[in-house]
């Protein structure tokens, strides 16, 4: 088993009611497995912020400052940041 820390930014922190949480996953789990776990844990509030086609193009997933996709294998003690894109100007 691995434990990852999920840090929620933008609308996600409001949807799940917290800014961080730890999640235990099987060794070898991918970002997609983490997302499915979070969808089950947080239900409609969390799921409504994700793209309808599971491409998650409207969401940023970051690890060590770099964007990752659903196929990325997670490691013990990873910190995953989940955020909606923020525009500036």
Image (cartoon, grey):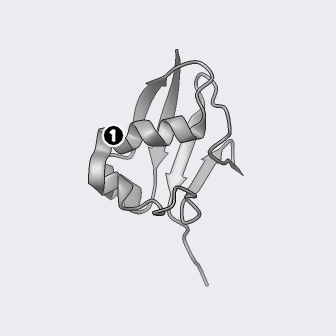
Q: Which residue is at a point 39% across and 56% down the rendered structure image?
A: 12
Along the horizontal axis of the image, is 63 left or right of 42? Answer: right
Residue at the farthest right position: 66
User: Does residue 17 show up?
Assistant: no
Q: Secondary structure at mark 1?
A: helix
Q: Quadrant of residue 59?
A: bottom right
Q: Which residue is at a point 33% across and 40% down the rendered structure image?
A: 40
Locate the C terminus by quadrant.
bottom right
Residue 36 picture location, percent across and down: 44, 40
Q: Which residue is at a point 35% across and 61% down the rendered structure image?
A: 48
User: Does residue 25 show up?
Assistant: yes
Along the horizontal axis of the image, is 30 left or right of 50? Answer: right
Q: Quadrant of residue 21?
A: top left
Residue 67 picture location, percent across and down: 69, 52
Judge by depth and name the residue closer to the eye, 23 or 69. Answer: 69
Residue 30 picture location, percent across and down: 60, 34
Along the horizontal axis of the image, is 10 left or right of 60? Answer: left
The residue that mark 1 highlights is 40
């Amino acid at each position: 088993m691995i434990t990852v820390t999920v840090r929620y930014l933008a609308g996600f922190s409001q949807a799940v009611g917290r800014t961080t949480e730890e999640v235990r996953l099987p060794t070898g789990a991918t970002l997609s497995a983490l997302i499915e776990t979070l969808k089950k844990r947080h239900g409609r509030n969390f799921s409504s912020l994700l793209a309808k086609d599971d491409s998650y193009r409207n969401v940023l997933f970051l690890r060590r400052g770099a964007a990752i996709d659903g196929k990325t294998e997670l490691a013990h003690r990873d910190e995953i940041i989940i955020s909606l894109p923020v525009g500036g100007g």
